[in-house]
Image (tube, grey):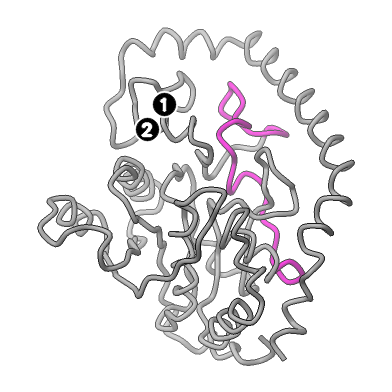
């Protein structure tokens, strides 16, 4: 990027949270996201990104989407993906780098619950901040959830040129734009603590993440956890207490009380820490072999932008 985006600091300091909604099955996630964001970050604008054709104009969901946030349609951007067809829909996030009317944006996946303040992230002295993946895949890669970025047309143009010139960077057999952003910002990204994008499966029974940190955002990244989030009747006793839009279920109260017992919490924490240590050993062994193979074709983003 060089100095092309330094002008960001002269803007009117407009900030917003952006999420994408491309299909109706994620509506419950959007409702929960809106509700928890409003509860924890009152007054923070929510923009819902989509593309023309995602919904029919007379679909009643369109009116509800507009009530939940500013519904903004962009020109679609997608590449085929053999791992999950739905991943091809996520490339539209790159269009956000064109939104130069904003000084900074926080991109949230629609399958997250916001539990704490996010506004301080807008003031980080960086153009891109993320959390490393804390799910089942490689730790050096991004897993979506939360990204803070500063729009810049020069960056957008560089991204699009690189993708066009190097089709392998479309990552058609893996995680699409997540892997691309992991590669593009791998040397310049600001690493946020895990609590800013805590995978649901790492949530301890006392409501904390590994190391005892209170989560600021819980990410329901895998299909099984998405089903739990979108269907409150299958909610777990712990994190269902965080639900905002969906009604609470009295039958879970006894289970919540049981899980809150100190001896249960300590046992769960010990099990979690042991599991974490095992995963760290596995990932540290696989990391050197996995990442070079995955990115051996790629040169640093700074080199390819010159």
**Mark 1, secondary structure of its residue:** helix
Nearest to the observer: residue 120 or residue 48: 48
- Which residue in the protein does label 1 denote? 240
Q: Residues within 10 Å of mark 2 (few under 14, many from 20)?
A: some
Asked which quadrant contains residue 51, the reply is bottom left
**Mark 2, secondary structure of its residue:** loop
Residue shown at 10%/58% (left/top)? Answer: 58
- Which residue in the protein does label 2 denote? 243
Q: Is residue 285 left or right of residue 291?
A: right
Magenta part of the chain: 185-212
Asked which quadrant contains residue 270, the reply is top right
Nearest to the observer: residue 128 or residue 186: 186
Q: Position of residue 206 (x, y in %)?
A: 58, 23
Query: What is the quadrant of the N terminus in the image?
Result: bottom right
Q: CA distance from mark 1 to mark 2?
A: 5 Å
Q: Is residue 274 above or below residue 95?
A: above
């Amino acid at each position: 990027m060089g100095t092309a985006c330094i002008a960001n600091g002269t803007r009117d300091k407009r900030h917003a949270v952006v999420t994408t909604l491309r299909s109706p099955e994620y509506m419950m996630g959007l409702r929960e996201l809106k509700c928890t964001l409003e509860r924890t970050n009152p007054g923070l604008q929510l923009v819902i990104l989509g593309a023309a054709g995602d919904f029919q104009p007379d679909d009643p969901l369109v009116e509800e989407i507009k009530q939940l946030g500013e519904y903004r349609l962009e020109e679609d951007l997608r590449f085929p993906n053999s791992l999950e067809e739905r991943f091809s829909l996520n490339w539209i996030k790159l269009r956000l780098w064109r939104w130069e009317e904003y000084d900074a944006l926080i991109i949230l996946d629609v399958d997250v619950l916001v539990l704490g303040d996010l506004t301080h992230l807008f003031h980080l002295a960086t153009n891109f901040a993320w959390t490393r993946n804390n799910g089942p895949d490689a730790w050096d890669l991004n897993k979506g959830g939360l990204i803070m970025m500063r729009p810049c047309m020069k960056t957008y143009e560089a991204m699009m040129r690189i993708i066009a010139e190097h089709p392998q960077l479309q990552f058609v057999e893996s995680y699409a734009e997540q892997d691309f952003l992991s590669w593009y910002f791998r040397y310049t990204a600001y690493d946020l603590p895990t609590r800013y994008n805590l995978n649901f499966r790492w949530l301890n029974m006392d409501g904390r993440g590994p190391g005892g940190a209170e989560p600021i955002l819980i990410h329901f990244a895998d299909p099984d956890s998405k089903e739990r989030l979108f269907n409150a009747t299958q909610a777990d006793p712990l994190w269902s207490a965080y639900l905002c839009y969906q009604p609470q279920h009295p039958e879970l109260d006894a289970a919540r009380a049981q899980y809150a017992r100190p001896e249960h919490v300590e046992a769960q924490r010990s099990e979690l820490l042991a599991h974490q240590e095992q995963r760290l050993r596995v990932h540290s062994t696989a990391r050197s072999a996995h990442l070079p193979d995955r990115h051996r074709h790629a040169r640093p983003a700074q080199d390819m932008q010159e």
